[in-house]
Amino acid sequence: MLRISALLLLLLTVVPLWARENSPTWIEVRSEHFTVVTNAGEKQGRHVIDQFERMRWVFQTMFPKMNVDPVSPIEVLALKSEKDFRALEPAAYLGKGKLNLAGYFLRAPDKNFIMLRLDANDADHPYATVYHEYTHLEIGDAIEWMPLWLNEGLAEFFQNTELEEKTARLGEPSPDDLLYLRQHQLIPLETLFRVDANSPYYHEEQKGSVFYAESWALTHLLETSDAMHHTNRLQTYVELVSQHQDPVAAAQKAFGDLGKLQEALQDYTSRASYQYFRLPTPPLNEGAFTVEAITEPQADAVRADFLAYNGRTGDARTILEGVLKADANNLQAHETMGYLAFREGNLGEAKKWYAEAVALDSQSFLAQYYFAALSLMDGTTDAQVEASLRTAIRLNPRFAPAYDALAGLYGRRRENLDEAHMLSVQAVSLEPANLNYRIDCANLLMEQERFDDSIRVLEAAKEVAKTPQQEEIVASRIGQVQLLQGEAEREKAQRAEIAATQGMVRVMKGTDAVSGGGSGDTALPQPKHPTETPHGKMLTFWGTIHGVTCSYPAVMELQVTGAKGKLDLYNNNYYKVEYSYSRAGATPEGELHPCQDLEGSKAEVEYFRTADKTVDGQIVAVMLVK
């Protein structure tokens, strides 16, 4: 009995110690719009997510026409110490003399990360970094064309926001920025307007501080001046640079004499008082937040994902290997390993990782989408690929790439073309500035022989083209559709003429029977190989094209010789073959003439096997190596 009591006592003393040592130090806090992962405790996690929800409301109120919720998820890493922060900080900021960051915003095409250091010393505005980084997120797609000074100036403008119980005070002056500018020489405005992400003004500590402070001061001057005098100088500037005008030329048009603006800015930084905006705010319900403890491997997987996206791939891989040893079924680790393999160009390995994530019942729309997209790249068009794309759309109905990919899947199968068209239209409506989606939509219409509609889509795409190369791509595609349309119309006219001729022959012979090719009949020449709708697995072959022969009306036959042998391929309508170049943005110089221009070219040819065993297959696409 004494031994049992001693054992129970031992368990009572040992188990709590074990529990303390292994208790999770990371938590995940979720709201309707944000996810915060932190090692600073529940109170801090709730406070951070509360700040983001309040700032979201401010932006929604100030910019009612703007969609304040980005398509990609918003993940916030709120770290309790400088040591934790620097373990994840981008390599560009780790060198001596670089800015000592308290927060970092990372925007990728498919994710949004905000990293915060919660021990940063900022007593006046303890959550200034939260507001600053969230402003970057809300600026969203404008980051593509917005000059860096205005991007950072707006973030600095909103970072001084004070959120009280019922009021938000926006655009309060920054004492630190004003003090710094009064002690240092301003950057000339022409230089400020041209600062980009590669400029030392954006990275080096002293110059970086001048850049941020001056960007804030100029933005604050223009915002308050426009409000006081009922002018729209800043809005005019935004409209000009959004049209890709030179930032200095746009500033001269919108702001006038830059020398006078420089003097006004110098005077502005010497003022004793400044105006700001006041906005009433509704209370938020903290009870809507959910809090969950997460394990160290789960937290490490999130940290590794951030490292992978900010370019520290070696560190990310090291952490992920440890995560997978501890938890072989960790979904986030599988997805991030897939992302790393994809970045390195190892598409087979990337597909393997994403396939395993899908098999583990991933509820990540990105895992479902990337598995399907990689499958389409290797020619797989089976039901599993279709199911993953539909799952991605269900999980995130605003994710345009999944709609475009599913439309492309149906297009390759030559089935459900009406639904494919609607899916393509949805992709365009979600991302109207994406030129590729518009071209894909036009291709689907062309497959349905809706040539006029296809051309109308491409004409509208001209307005989206941003570079001369993109304009050439659209013009080339319009030319291809017009050629195909003309060929279809000629073929239709020839068939009508033959039918009429056959009718006259029958009348002359005094019979109503349909002739089967007697001496008096005329018929279109029949191709020697069958015309089949693409089916089965799409195959690819690298090599050099030679022996190109063409015959009426649009039959093309060729051979491809490569390291794996030789293929004999054909297509009975070379206008329906998709031609492209392997180098991004490369386009044919003028019109591509398959019968003349393919001979001797290196290419990857996509094809499928047909019932005719005298040849290797029917051509679907030709990608020329440039």
Image (cartoon, grey):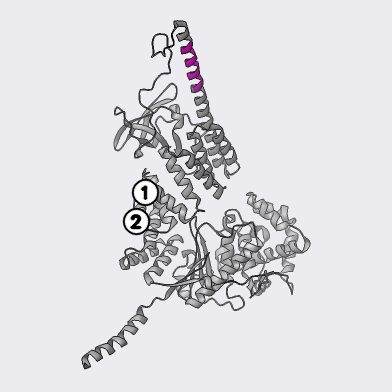
Quadrant into which the N terminus falls: bottom left
Q: Residue furthest bottom?
A: 2
For label 2, the crowd category at 10 Å Cα-Cα, with few meaning under 14, some 14 to 19 and many 20 or more, is few
Residue 14 drawn in magenta: no
In the displayed orientation, state which residue is furthest to the front: 512
Q: Residue 574 occupies which quadrant of the picture?
A: top left
Q: Amino acid at mark 1?
A: Gln
Residue 616 spot, x, y in % from top left: 31, 31
Q: What residue lies at 69% left-to-right and 65% top-to-bottom?
A: 220
Label 1 secondary element: helix
| Tag count | 2
Q: Is residue 104 left or right of residue 239?
A: left
Query: Between marks 2 and 1, how big is the CA–CA gap?
Result: 11 Å
The residue shown at (54%, 74%) is 47
**Where residue 344 appears, x then y in whole percent?**
39, 54
Q: Which mark is residue 357?
A: none
Q: Which quarter of the figure is the C terminus placed in?
A: top left
Q: Amino acid at mark 2?
A: Ala
Q: Is residue 547 above or below residue 36?
A: above
Question: Which sits earlier in the primary sequence, circle 2 or circle 1?
Answer: 2
Mark 1 closeness class: few <14, some 14–19, many ≥20 residues within 10 Å: few
Q: Is residue 498 magenta?
A: yes
Q: Which residue is denoted by mark 2 in the rendering?
A: 359
Q: Which residue is mark 1?
A: 384
Residue shown at 63% from the left, 73% from the top:
163
Q: Is residue 211 visible?
A: no
> Can you give x and y, in whole percent of width and height, for residue 123 in the image?
59, 79
Magenta-highlighted residues: 492-503
